[in-house]
Amino acid sequence: MLRILHQIFRTGIVTEPLPAGVEKEIKQVGAGLEEAIRRRFRRSLTIREVDAGSCNGCELEIHALNNPIYNGERFGIHFTASPRFADMLLVTGPATRNMEIALKRTYDATPPPKLVVAVGDCGCNGGIFGESYASLGGIGKIIPVDAYIPGCPPRPADLLRGILRVIS
Amino acid sequence: MANLKNIITGLLGTDAVRDAGHYPPTVPSFLVPRERFIEAARGMKKAGARLVAEWATDERKSNRGFGIYTCYSLDSEYIIISCRIPLEDPTFPSLTKKFVPAFRFERQMRSLMGVIPVGHPDPRPWIKHEDWPEDAWPLRKDFDPSRPMPRVKGEYQWIRAEGEGVYEIPVGPVHAGIIEPGHFRFQAVGEDILHLEERLGYVHKGIEKRFEALSWIEGVRLAGRVSGDTTVAHALAYCRALEAMTGSVPPERALWLRALMLERERIANHLGDIGAICNDVAFTFLLYQFSRLREVVLRTNDKLFGHRLMMDRIIPGGVTADLTPEGKEKILREANWIKKEFERLVIIYDENPSLEDRVRDAGVLLPEDARELGVVGFVARASGVGLDCRVQNPFTPYDRIIPKMTVLNCGDVHARAWVRIEEVRESLRIIGEILKGLPQGEISGCLDPPSKEGSGFAVVEGWRGEIVYWLQSGPTGGINRCMIRDPSSVNWIAVEQSIHGNIVPDFPLCNKSFNQSYSGHDL
């Protein structure tokens, strides 16, 4: 136990302010953002992540949002296990044919108003996998998408910026 | 040491014809008659070899019908044995009863190429879902990949347990965490798992077919996206197979930089996994501590190589990112810091009784089962099977910097975590050695196009284990077939086997300790 406490105190708080550009943008979005989360999402934005066919690269970076350095929770961003509790679906792609039904069901299980954010180049337009018998292309081909976060994979800061932008 | 090549030529005599267009020559490829295919497999089994991969090709354009290929390995040796079958009678003898990994390989071959393994115990499709038309075989050359796949009626037949109190739990494809999709079906009584059956294929993106529409150079980008967490090792395996075909050797400095990236990828993934295993027993403290170390590694990657996961940094003929003297210093400083922090955390892991209570004896894969299932990578090494391509099939600089292999016998969650811990230590040492010996010079060389109707083979030890690529050029010199065997293709079946006798709530923990790729498996 002492070792654990020692390591905790030695580590301190490692959470960083966002990169200058992102910080500035959030300021631009302004007080309205906090207001938006407070009003629309009751102080917390709950996200259900759906891998609709990704190579797992995007998932790694979405994971990083929860590490102590990016600490997405400080913005009230929280990942949930069930689409029933979700305000937002964060969907990585390309949408595969074998995931099409599961993705539609997840979308239907999410209560309105639901925001859908397509993540990664493949989530946006199918990326290198394109459109084929197995890959249907971007997430927008299956369910309505409200915002796109491109990148292969997008960096955690880009993800945060994208999420914060769409809820404002 | 038994020589697989001699066994085959001794067994089949002139019936085994050596394929002169296959590279590298150290991995011989033999064509045998279909009726003696099973005999060759029997010979391999007797010699104690394992089945590395089994795949099919469509070579009708070259008037050779379909090709059925197998790759076996024993110690440091690899051998490829193939036979040809005609369109009118696309059957071949199933190897499933001799080699367990053939069970899924052959279901996949049947599903995607329409070749029939005679004597296979399970006719259900694999990767191909039951709502695909029966005669849709995407890997055949006359299949048009741009055509959408229609949906037909069909139901997957699960293996079901019956009896009083037996119930079924379906899980997935959309899981609770931020992970890839797949379906798990449990048959349970109370909390005890009677049986687990996996059904994968949800992230099938048609990667192998997609390769056939790309040029050799474009192919490496796709290889780097077969499994995003293993982008370096996959790109490297693809490049090495292509370089074997063309006979080109990248500059020495590029080879060393490739190894540097490979080890950094291993460290980043192992750090993430060790933390995630702790998280699955509700010890979040270590998750956050390890994920902090992982983030530091990724940021340095971004700074030095221009990409956090080092995607697209390895290309045929070399690498795209060089290391400056300052970069070298930064890596060394970082390695020292990580080492110190890491060791502190390992002591905490090791001394925590509540953690030990959960990770010991959970999800045991016995050494004899591991051997039978043909598993690779850290899964094999945690179950007494000492396989590591860096040791058995080294390429520069691993011929000079020899990795120390950690092999444990208990095969439980703890063993798989501990092998990773030892490998982080070892990779940090290897990185130090690489930086000490890093030669000067160019970082990429030229690459000739591969000759027509040839093939190339390569194995690379990614962080999950042995990755196999087999490339084949067609009659016009383009990619005719790209066979990818991720470690997950053989290791997934071990997850099913290791779960017997465990309780349902321990499944996430056991699964995390394997952490196999869905994308690399489904392709």
Image (cartoon, rainbow, N blue to C red):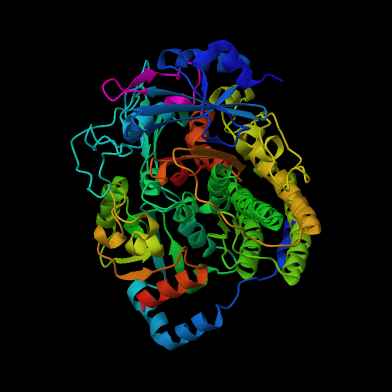
Q: x, y percentage for residue B401? A: 78, 46
* Residue B379 appearing in the image: yes
Nearer-the-camera pick, B168 or A89: A89
Picture residue at 32% right of the left edge, 54% below the top:
A95
Decide if residue B132 is on the left or right side of residue B439: left
Q: x, y percentage for residue B239? A: 55, 49
> Where is residue A108, by image quadrant?
bottom left
Q: Quadrant of the C terminus of chain B?
A: top left
- Magenta: predominant secondary structure element? loop
Decide if residue A68 is on the left or right side of residue B58: right
Nearer-the-camera pick, A71 or A19: A19
Q: Quadrant of the N terminus of chain B?
A: top right
Residue B294 located within the stretch drawn in magenta: no
Callout count: 0
Nearer-the-camera pick, B107 or A19: B107
Q: x, y percentage for residue A20? A: 55, 83
Picture residue at 41% right of the left edge, 85% below the top:
A29
The image shows residue B376, relative to residue B263, as above or below, that is above
Q: x, y percentage for residue B123? A: 32, 23
The image shows residue B379, relative to residue B118, as above or below, that is below
- Write down the region rendered in magenta: B85-103
The image shows residue B214, relative to residue A66, as above or below, that is above
Residue B94 located within the stretch drawn in magenta: yes
- Residue lying farthest to the right in this orientation: B436
* Residue A90 appearing in the image: no
